[in-house]
Image (cartoon, helix red, strand yellow):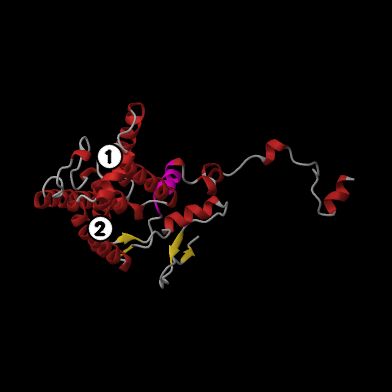
Amino acid sequence: MSSAAGAAGQPLDSRPPLASETSVAAPEQLTRPSPGRSHGGAERLRSFVLKPRGGGTRRRASDAVRLGLAVLLVAVSIPLIRANTSIEIELDQLLTPLPAGVRWLVETLWQLGSFGVIVTLALGGLLVPRLVALRQMAISGLATLGLCLLLAWLLGPDGGRPPVPQLSGIDARYPVTQLAVAMAVALTGLPFLSRPMHRIVGIALAVAAFSAILGGYGLPLNVASSIAIGWGAAAACHLVMGSPIGLLSAREATLAVRDLRVDVRALTPVPAQVWGGAGLLRAG
């Protein structure tokens, strides 16, 4: 029987291979990482916090429109602040003072939404290569601080608002520097952040502005005008220095493809790119 099997070209040992014989892999297969696990939690955390890094930067015409609107809003608000309108005084008396039991909560929200946002975004800016975001946020914040000091010097500490007894115990200083700087820093860093972080930062700024009014840290018009100052400073910074487009870079696209369990060595940009998208070729 064995000689007949050998003559027919069949193996002499036709038993099925053992599990121990089939589980041996080549050295490169043992050391090669799985396509979907080539990057760890740090890269995933970065992608949740920050936008993709590809596409470069550009200057948007909408930033010029925002800057013009901010200048207009500040110019309109200053005469209204100096007029001490009865509507603003009645609104402030309606919202303040707060009960003593919740005053600590409003103060906490005010500090977290202003100083807390600045510190958090400064730490997040360390994740951006070459500290581009951190540099832009620092320039915008310092420029806003200088503008607030200039306005306070030109208009007076209360923006030229005449003192009235109804506003006793309310901080009538103009601008509300803490809020204006936080607004400028946050809106300057916003193009570097992912969409979920946009919502978180937007909610934090809205809470800070409302807490400033409720806690007596600023009058309604002062708060609104300070928001416009920070908004305009961020738009001016983007207009001068540009803001990121936020397309996937070749490395980020490669990691995303590997997450789909597709074995690819690398992706490279195509020579001719189309505006608004990123063309990539598989290199291996």
User: Crowdedness of circle 2 by 10 Å Cα count: few (<14), some, many (20+)?
Assistant: many
Q: Mark 1 points at which residue?
A: 115
**Above or below 242: residue 40:** above
User: Could you tell me which secondary element the residue under label 2 belongs to?
Assistant: helix
**Above or below 43: residue 105:** above
Q: Name the residue under label 2.
A: 232
Residue sitting at the far right: 1
Highlighted magenta segment, given as a residue range: 42-51
Residue 48 falls inside the magenta stretch: yes
Residue 95 seen anywhere in this rendered image of the structure = yes
Q: Residue at x 39, y 45 (%)?
A: 203
Nearer to me, 42 or 242: 242
User: Could you tell me which secondary element the residue under label 1 belongs to?
Assistant: helix
Q: Residue at x 31, y 49 (%)?
A: 186
Return the x and y of residue 238 as percentages of the image width and height.
27, 60
Return the x and y of residue 118 as percentages of the image width and height.
28, 43
Question: Image quarter for residue 157?
Answer: top left
Number of on-image labels: 2
Instruction: Give the label on residue 49, or none.
Output: none
Nearer to me, 70 or 223: 223
Residue 95 falls inside the magenta stretch: no
Question: Image quarter for residue 252?
Answer: bottom left
For residue 278, side relative to residue 171 (left or right): right
